[in-house]
Image (cartoon, helix red, strand yellow):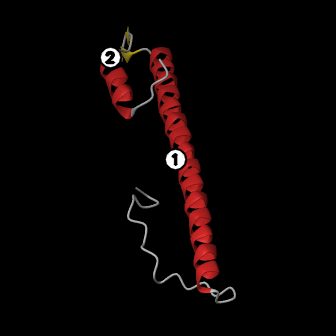
Amino acid sequence: MASKTLEEVAEYMKKMHFRKGLFGIQPASMWKKLEDLDSEYRSVFYAQELSYEARLKERDEKIAELEKKLSLMKNRLSDRTGDGGRNDISGIATYKGEGVNG
């Protein structure tokens, strides 16, 4: 089935049935279902891992973009004031967009 969310795993568990044996359930059926369930959890974990890595990459790209903008602003301010490389950016408005974790 290759679930992508824990909700899908929960739905899979609701539909899971074991074969009955003489004294309860058949062990082979139980082990097969447990292996299938493990596979479902692993696929959810993998999907979440991919999502997390994509978010980290997006965050790193945004940080690099903002650092580049900040560097350009520092250079422009330095060029305007003629301070010989002094990077006082106290007069520059702060970024009011979403934060790094946003």
Q: Is residue 21 above or below residue 79?
A: above
Residue plotted at (48% across, 27% down): 40
At label 1, which amino acid type do we have? Arg
Report the side of 44 relative to 24 (left or right): right
Q: Residue furthest right?
A: 84
At label 2, which amino acid type do we have? Lys
**Residue 26 place in picture, x, y as percent:** 43, 14
**Residue 21 place in picture, x, y as percent:** 39, 10
Residue plotted at (38% across, 15% down): 18
Q: Earlier in the sequence, mark 2 or mark 1?
A: 2
Graded by Cα atoms within 10 Å as few (under 14), some (14 to 19) or many (20 or more), the crowding at tag 2 reads few
Q: Nearer the viewer, residue 63 or 45?
A: 63
Circles 2 and 1: CB atoms closer than 8 Å: no
Write down the residue under mark 2. Answer: 15
Label 2, label 1: how many angstroms apart (C-alpha)? 33 Å
**Residue 56 place in picture, x, y as percent:** 55, 51
Q: Nearer the viewer, residue 89 or 24?
A: 89
Residue plotted at (51% across, 37% down): 45
Q: Indicate the quadrant where residue 62 lies.
A: bottom right
Write down the residue under mark 1. Answer: 55
Report the side of 74 relative to 101 (left or right): right
Q: Secondary structure at mark 2?
A: helix
Q: Residue 83 bears which disc, if any?
A: none
Q: Nearer the viewer, residue 87 or 64?
A: 87
**Residue 74 place in picture, x, y as percent:** 59, 76
Graded by Cα atoms within 10 Å as few (under 14), some (14 to 19) or many (20 or more), the crowding at tag 1 reads few
Report the side of 23 relative to 89 (left or right): left
Q: Secondary structure at mark 1?
A: helix
Report the side of 16 relative to 64 (left or right): left
